[in-house]
Image (cartoon, grey):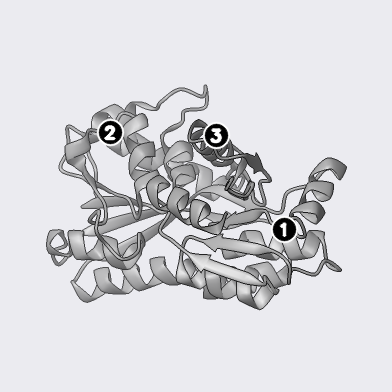
């Protein structure tokens, strides 16, 4: 039996990558990015970003580790104004600063940015979830009193209030928990927004795709509760009881059920497991 079509809701760059990967395994997939990603526009954040890059480039890192919350955090931290890899990427390996990734996608982005594999810490492959809690199990012993950890993240711009509230309660929950663990170990956390998230402007074709996929048995691959809030805002009258979702974290699965998805399953955001879950839904 042929596997159902998959609707990939990640930001555009990541969605294209997942569509290609799924296609290479014979899975029909379509990208419907539900979060728009752009460079951070706040002048203070831009200045802080330049300063952090410069410190790494000159091998004067004041940090025990840089924690990147997503592949977009990696891309926007290490991209120079010319769109090339900043010298900080090559310099990181010459310092004692570690690069922390909460999941395989972020770890892959670090490798693509030029960070040596031996400098990257990530959850164990057998971890029940790929998130901040699983990451902490691998890096807790690194943090000593007085150490500083820079958390590179994104922030929501002009998102609807419901999305902001949900994001605060759900998606930021893991990184806030991680910050508390670092503090309990005597470390200090500094937050650095490197990019902005916002609701996408869906085209007429994309809205049509979303309405069809709500009814035709497509599998919605969900990796963000904020993306679900954007979907609900774009289609406020849409019923989701006939739709099925594949969520990459229990918190996202909870948000999908709250949104009204009729069938919700969970799996880790690893290609092999996503493929197996999609095939089982066929």
Disc 1 secondary structure class: loop
Look at discs 1 and 2 and give the one toward the viewer. Answer: 2
Question: Which label sits on residue 115?
Answer: 2
Residue at (78%, 47%) from the top-left corner? 209
Q: Gap between marks 3 and 2, in whole Å?
A: 28 Å
Q: Earlier in the sequence, mark 3 or mark 2?
A: 3
**Residue 245 versus residue 78 in the image, above or below:** below
Quadrant of the rendered image containing residue 229 = bottom right
Look at discs 3 and 2 and give the one toward the viewer. Answer: 3
**Residue 27 versus residue 207 in the image, above or below:** above
Disc 3 secondary structure class: helix
| Picture coordinates of residue 202, whole percent (x, y) | 79, 47
Q: Earlier in the sequence, mark 1 or mark 2?
A: 2
**Residue 115 versus residue 52 in the image, above or below:** above
Question: Which label sits on residue 158?
Answer: 1
> In the image, 12: left or right of 26?
right
> In the image, 249: left or right of 3?
left
Question: Which label sits on residue 12?
Answer: none
Q: Gap between marks 1 and 2, in whole Å?
A: 33 Å
Residue at (73%, 49%) from the top-left corner? 200
Q: Which residue is mark 3?
A: 23
Q: Gap between marks 3 and 1, in whole Å?
A: 34 Å
């Amino acid at each position: 039996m042929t596997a159902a079509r998959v609707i990939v809701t990640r930001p555009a760059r990541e969605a294209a990558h997942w569509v290609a990967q799924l296609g290479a395994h014979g899975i029909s997939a379509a990208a419907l990015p539900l979060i728009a990603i752009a460079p951070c526009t706040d002048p203070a954040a831009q200045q802080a970003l330049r300063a952090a890059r410069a410190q790494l480039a000159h091998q004067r890192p004041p940090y025990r580790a840089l924690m990147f919350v997503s592949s977009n955090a990696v891309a926007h931290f290490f991209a120079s104004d010319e769109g090339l890899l900043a010298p900080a990427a090559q310099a990181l390996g010459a310092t004692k600063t570690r690069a922390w990734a909460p999941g395989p996608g972020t770890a892959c982005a670090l490798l693509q940015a030029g960070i040596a594999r031996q400098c990257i810490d990530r959850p164990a492959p057998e971890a029940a979830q790929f998130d901040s809690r699983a990451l902490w199990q691998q890096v807790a012993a690194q943090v000593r009193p007085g150490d500083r950890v820079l958390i590179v993240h994104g922030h929501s711009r002009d998102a609807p209030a419901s999305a902001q509230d949900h994001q605060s309660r759900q998606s930021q929950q893991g990184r806030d928990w991680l910050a508390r663990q670092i503090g309990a170990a005597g470390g200090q956390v500094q937050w650095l927004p490197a990019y902005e998230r916002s609701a996408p402007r869906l085209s007429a074709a994309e809205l049509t795709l979303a309405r069809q996929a709500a009814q035709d048995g497509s599998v919605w691959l969900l990796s963000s509760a904020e993306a679900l809030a954007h979907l609900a805002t774009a289609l406020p009258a849409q019923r989701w009881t006939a739709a099925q979702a594949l969520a990459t974290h229990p918190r996202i699965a909870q948000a999908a059920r709250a949104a009204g998805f009729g069938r919700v399953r969970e799996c880790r955001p690893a290609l092999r497991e996503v493929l197996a879950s999609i095939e089982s839904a066929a």
